[in-house]
Image: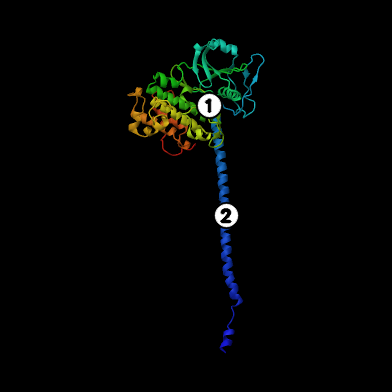
Amino acid sequence: MGIQNATSSPAPSKNHIDGHHHEVIPSSSLLVVVILVIIVILLLAILLLTVMLRRLQFSRANTAASTTRRIIADTDCMFIARSTMNIAPTSDRGCLYGNSSAGGTPPPKGREVQVQVQVFTLNEAEMATNKFSEANVIGNGASGAVFRGVLRDGTVAAIKMLRPHGRYAERAFRQEVDLLSRLRSPFIAELLGYCADQNHRLLVFEYMPNGSLHKHLHQRKTLNWGARLKIALDCAKALEYLHEHNTPSIIHRNFKSTNILLDKKLRPKLSGFGLAKIGSEKLNGQISTRVLGTTGYLAPEYASTGKLTTKSDVYSYGVILLELLTGRVPIDTTRPPGEHVLVSWALPHLTNRDKVVEMIDPILQGQYSNKDLIQVAAIAAMCVQAEADYRPLITDVVQSLMPLIKNPTTNLSSNSLRFSRSPIPRS
């Protein structure tokens, strides 16, 4: 009887088993559904973010385009078309003529880009310089010698005879003529003409009687504090014109004191465009190129990777500011250890109000206020930051320097840039 009772105990019902399975299946299914919903939501969010970024880029592009059109309409600045100069020899003069309309981006509607430079023969250049007499040499650099000359109409000019360096030099010559024939700014040395007679390549510039900034800072040592501030401001305006008033922007790539020339009133103009590059139209404006330039002025990211932006020029400008403040050259191996490289030596001084006075060019003593000195030192410190994102836009530098200039020729801005160690976004 006991055995019968034990063996006849009721088995689990089918409903009970089915109910047990019904509890497991909904839990796993629910987990799968939740995961799928999350994935769908993430995909939609990514899609929405992509659409918003594209619309933002499109909006910025439209804003930049409208700004460029307004600048072209309201100023005398020439539009820089992204083109290659088509130069062909002529039968009557043996020189080259430029045709800027061949290839590349056409000029904006309603305004033609015209090449407003003369074409000279070698004979005319020889007559102007007394056959390139040594007595007329006013400069000598890596790219060639510069002669003082008098043109047939009596204009005094600086005639640069480029050294032949093969196809690269020929391409650089054509690009420089193409670029400079379009630039019109009171802060850029004007190209009057050129010659490409046979194997000779000449550039004819307006004459700057006071020579280079390098000569005045490191040889004559005659510039006072007020003159240095005005030079600093006008040099910044030269870069502002290249970076902000041209589309795409122009990167000078060889911004240094020997390429800053002074007129009879010590007003600076930028020259030396042989290495200049047209910037990228992308959002960050970065391009990759060969590392060329002058040691001591090269931005760290450009020197190490070949990646070039307008912020590379800002770094070089910061080195110029340090030259103006200290009277020192960028690289000087005759100095004591630790002082060979100007930027490395100066940076710790620039952020210390007591030490910054110790680094100033001795001939400037008593000519400046501590407030102005600290402001200029702060600008220099930001311009030579190792990280490009920490450097200010050159427009911000201009706005910060303008209030420091006594009786400037342009209206002062009361908005001075507040420097901080944080990236400054392009508006």
Which of the pair 81/28 is nearer the observer?
28
Q: Earlier in the sequence, mark 2 or mark 1?
A: 2
Give the residue number, with chain letter if any, for mark 2.
39
Which is in the foreground here, disc 2 or disc 1?
A: 2
Task: Kindly tell me whether residue 379 is visible in this rendering.
Answer: no
User: Mark 1 packing: few (<14 Cα in 10 Å), some, or many (20+)?
Assistant: few
Label 2 packing within 10 angstroms: few (<14), some (14-19), many (20+): few
- Inspect this view and state whether residue 340 appears: yes
* SS state under label 2: helix
Where is 149 relative to 234, above or below?
Answer: above
Report x, y in % for residue 378: 39, 32
| Residue shown at 57% from the left, 69% from the top | 23
Q: Amino acid at mark 1?
A: Asp
Q: Is residue 382 left or right of residue 48?
A: left
Q: Is residue 148 above or below residue 217?
A: above
User: Of helix, strand and loop, which one carries label 1?
Assistant: helix
